[in-house]
Image (cartoon, rainbow, N blue to C red):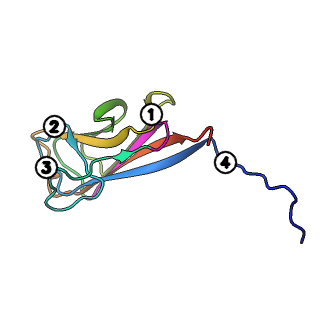
Amino acid sequence: MSRASQIERIIAKGQLVPLVFMQDAVAASQTDAQLLVAEVASAAANSVDGYVMPFEGEVVAVTARLSAAATAGSLTVGATVGGTEETSPALSITTEQSASETTLRGTATFSAGDVIGAEITTDASWDATTADLVVVVWVLLHLDGI
């Protein structure tokens, strides 16, 4: 078996990356509550609530899964860029256990160094208060030029 005399370096121009966020026992009447990267039962006010992006890119999807479905109320889920919630992609959950939403490329862009997070809002009638929540914000990192 002969070795090639020239090594060719091939890299994708983009990488799809899942960013995972969680909350235990999703309470009712939350407004723009930042989800944490690593959930603990008694989260401190300064817990980690986002990922610093090493490259520019864009949010392309949000997915969510609850450990139990609600029978009343609503839960909205959105990605944040620099602490500001993006309008798309976003989820609106009522009695489902799972939800997903994609968005068009170029809709929710970010720069290298921006912090990507996730936040939720529940109304007063949300009754899945013992359900745990996992949210994945899917980002496409632009790797051009490296």
- The residue range painted magenta reads 54-67
Q: Looking at the image, which residue is at 21% across and 53% down? A: 47
Residue, disc 3: 27
| 140 lies left or right of 26 | right
The label nearer to you, 1 versus 3, is 1
Q: Is residue 111 visible?
A: yes
The label nearer to you, 1 versus 2, is 1
Give the x, y percent position of residue 113: 41, 39
* In-front residue for pair 3/84: 3
Give the x, y percent position of residue 76: 25, 38
Image quarter hosting the N terminus: bottom right
The label nearer to you, 4 versus 2, is 4
Disc 4 and disc 2: Cα gap in Å? 41 Å
Which quadrant of the figure has residue 80? top left
Residue, disc 1: 111
Disc 1 and disc 4: Cα gap in Å? 20 Å
The earlier-in-sequence mark between 4 and 3 is: 4
The earlier-in-sequence mark between 1 and 3 is: 3
Disc 2 and disc 3: Cα gap in Å? 10 Å
Q: Please report contact status of discs 1 and 4: CB closer than 8 Å, yes or no.
A: no
| 74 lies left or right of 14 | left
Q: Residue 11 carries which label?
A: 4
Numbered circles on residues, count: 4
The label nearer to you, 4 versus 3, is 4
Q: Looking at the image, which residue is at 45% across and 33% down? A: 103
Q: Can residue 74 be seen in this view?
A: no
The label nearer to you, 2 versus 3, is 2
The earlier-in-sequence mark between 1 and 4 is: 4
